[in-house]
Amino acid sequence: MEGIKQLINAGSNIVQSAQLYLNQAFKEKQLSSAETNVLMFLYTNGDKVIQDEIVSGVDVSKPAISRTINSLERKGYIVRKPSPTDKRAKLICLTDKAWQEEEFIQSVYADFLKIAATGLPVDKVKEFAELLQRVSDNIDSYRRSEKKRL
């Protein structure tokens, strides 16, 4: 159990440190780490997706993604367009402004990953990522099963 406590503490510290680093790096662009996480999802997975796909992909709550999408829209990074297949749904689409910032945003994330992996063998980074994913999957599975029970 002590190892899991260490893992959770380290994971929490990594998340907080990443948010601080990203918030500082994107301050001049007036973007938050939450906003750039959504932009990174759209750059990586393609835009013209419904909001629920972003919720699943970024693994953040619907209300938090909704606030982030609203903010990105106000700032001119995304627009919502009607879905051709579902009249109730809106597609989230990147604007020219967002595409112009892609290289900068991606480079900040790449720099942070280099900092985080400094001095670590590539195979250990991969193993660590797999272990963290397993912990995350275990927690998600438990949460889903608890929702069903209630």
Image (cartoon, rainbow, N blue to C red):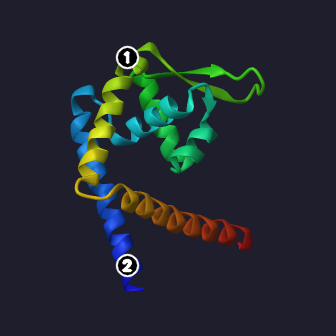
Going 40% across and 59% down the picture, which residue do you hit?
123
Mark-to-mark CA distance, 2 and 1:
42 Å
Q: Which amino acid is tagged 2?
A: Lys
For label 2, the SS is: helix
Where 41 sits versus 82, above or below?
Answer: below
Going 37% across and 58% down the picture, which residue do you hit?
125
- Where is residue 87, by image quadrant? top right
Name which of mark 2 and mark 1 comes first in the sequence. 2
Outermost residue, bottom side: 1
Q: Can residue 67 be seen in this view?
A: yes
Percent coordinates x, y for residue 60 in the rendering: 51, 50
Going 57% across and 64% down the picture, which residue do you hit?
137
**Crowdedness of circle 1 by 10 Å Cα count: few (<14), some, many (20+)?**
few
Looking at the rendered image, the quarter that the N terminus falls into is bottom left
Percent coordinates x, y for residue 22 in the rendering: 28, 42
39 relative position to 120: left or right: right
Q: Which amino acid is tagged 1?
A: Gln
Going 23% across and 36% down the picture, which residue do you hit?
25
**Crowdedness of circle 2 by 10 Å Cα count: few (<14), some, many (20+)?**
few
Percent coordinates x, y for residue 130 in the rendering: 49, 61
The residue labelled by disc 2 is 5
Percent coordinates x, y for residue 112 in the rendering: 27, 44
- Looking at the image, which is closer to me, 138 or 145? 138
Looking at the rendered image, the quarter that the C terminus falls into is bottom right
The label number, if any, that marks residue 100 in the structure image: 1
Q: Is residue 76 visible?
A: no
For label 1, the SS is: helix
- Where is residue 122, by image quadrant? bottom left
